[in-house]
Image: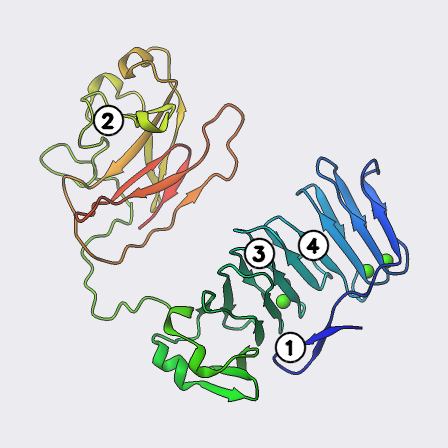
Amino acid sequence: MSYFVNAVGVPLPYSGASNHWYSASGSGPDLYGSSGNDSLYGASGVNVTMHGGMGDDIYYLYAASNKVAEAGSAGIDTISTWMNYKLPDNVENLIVTKAGNFAFGNGLDNIITAKAGHQTLDGGAGNDVLIDGGGGYDTFVVSNGNGSDLIANFAATDTVRLNGYGFMTFDQIHANMIQAGSNVILNLGSGEILEFKDTTIDKLQPSQFELPINKVGMTLSFNDDFNTLSLHNGQSGTWDTNFWWGAPNGSTLTQNNELQWYIDANYAPTSSVHPFSVDNGVLTITAAQTPADIKPLINNYEYTSGILTTHDTFSQTYGYFEMRPTCRKTPAPGRLSGCCRKTVRGRRSSTSWKCTDRTRTRF
Ligand SMILES: [Ca+2]
Ligand SMILES: [Ca+2]
Ligand SMILES: [Ca+2]
């Protein structure tokens, strides 16, 4: 049996070779393997839960409708998928093949392998082995309280994100590293370590460590907790509801072929449409179908929505910006796709938010 020794010296096994093969194509809602080592292949467009049972089972998932059910102590199991994926309970190992996706573990000691291109790996709790298995720049996420992980093939373009350990500078990290044979061990404190396999301290560079922003010495220049909504009326207030180049009746972004019209709160004829609301510190911007009587007033656009910008009231060149946006993952049928993005313009950075669906934003 092949295995990978983790950061605390425990060999984590890979799944053994399969002796039986099963396909979900044409199967019912449940597909069962044998008591031995199985390979179970999902299929796109098939709603199926695959049960490998006892033995080392390897699952190939092609769509979110391909599910895995494993019991505890039922072999060393592996899921291989192109999708963004977080391991379900009782599955030990994960392979994510597609660039740009994430690969998250569960509470077990996992072996998580990212294939070609950029991926984000997070083992979660347990003493996990995280492997850059195919180049590309990868991000390894390591969080306080989640055990001692090992990173293999940590390339010059890879980065590690250290959450909650209190490191603010690379010098602090450097001072907590030791060379242990062919590996580097970073002492994270609280009994946790992070091991970098087959590298030396001198090869590890500041650009490979994502640290929290050091806010000491920064001065708060702008904030809005959205306990109320302060709209700009031309003389006072904070937020404009129109682009600075917009028409009196509002605006849209024709170059994006957008379907919505941004209502200008200062334009009286459309004042019956209210894209903005605040509730207990949460700002909501709602996109909705345009009422028939409003449509001629907004160039016959099918949907109304809103933007907020401080273009005329606040701007700064440099700074640290923070927000907590929440966007709908999937638009309802007939609705616009959900998105929310910040507009930063060149040297003079103002604060703009525009949304094409229900969105909550908090500074
Ligand atoms: Ca099995
Ligand atoms: Ca199994
Ligand atoms: Ca884990």
Disc 4 marks a residue whose amino acid type is Ser
Q: In the displayed structure, would residue 33 be above or below residue 76?
A: above
Q: Which residue is mark 4?
A: 80
Q: In the displayed structure, would residue 20 be above or below residue 202?
A: above
Dot label at residue 6: 1
**C-alpha span from label 3 to label 2:** 47 Å
Camera-near label (2 vs 1) is 1
Q: Which residue is mark 3?
A: 116
Disc 3 marks a residue whose amino acid type is Ala
Give x and y (percent) for residue 174: 40, 82
Dot 4 or dot 2: first in sequence order is: 4
Camera-near label (4 vs 2) is 4
Instruction: Look at the numbered disc 3 and give the secondary structure of its residue.
Output: loop
Q: Which residue is mark 2?
A: 264
Instruction: Look at the numbered disc 4 and give the secondary structure of its residue.
Output: strand
Q: Ligand 3 is in which quadrant of the figure? A: bottom right
